[in-house]
Image (cartoon, helix red, strand yellow):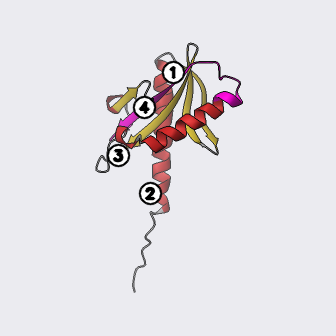
Amino acid sequence: MCKITSIFPSTNKRKQAKNNGEKAEQFAQQYLTEQGLTFVENNFFCKLGEIDLIFLDQQTYVFVEVRYRTKTAHGSAAESLNPNKLAKITKSATFWLQKNNKLANPCRFDAVLFDHKIDRQHLTWLKAVL
């Protein structure tokens, strides 16, 4: 008998990656709340892109991208913030501000990065990445 293998990633690997991404977002949400930010929304989707987390830091809306890398062979979590990804976040945030009548409010773009593990030791919070 011959075993047939697929060229596509297994469903289990995709589910695990999604679960890890969700865990990273939940951990980041908890961490930023502990740092004094007020949670507003998570996983905002629109045709322009997605925003992982939205917070309020006093009067400033904070749009947070969460990145997690188990291995850095293809680059670190920080290196995965490419110009294309940042442009999508910017467009999505502008849409969110417009949709919620908040265009007059100041905003900033942060990133919470995890390399290797989802824990405090491996967490990096970059403020104002754009």
From the image, tell me which residue sits under label 4.
112
Q: Quadrant of the C terminus?
A: top left
Question: Who comes first in sequence, dot 1 or dot 4?
Answer: 1
In contact (CB < 8 Å): disc 2 and disc 3: no
Instruction: Identify the residue at horizontal 46%, vertical 18% (top origin).
Output: 35
**Tag on residue 70?**
3
Amino acid marked by disc 2: Lys
CA gap between label 1 and label 4 equals 13 Å
Question: Who comes first in sequence, dot 4 or dot 2?
Answer: 2
Q: Residue furthest top?
A: 58
From the image, tell me which residue sits under label 2.
13
Q: Foreground residue, 22 or 57?
A: 57
Question: Who comes first in sequence, dot 4 or dot 3?
Answer: 3
Of tags 1 and 4, the one toward the viewer is 4
Does residue 96 lie above or below 68 as drawn?
Answer: above
Task: Provide the secondary structure element on which disc 3 rests.
Answer: loop
Amino acid marked by disc 1: Thr
Alpha-carbon neighbours of circle 4 within 10 Å: few (<14), some, or many (≥20)? many
Alpha-carbon neighbours of circle 3 within 10 Å: few (<14), some, or many (≥20)? some
Q: Position of residue 84 (x, y in %)?
A: 47, 44
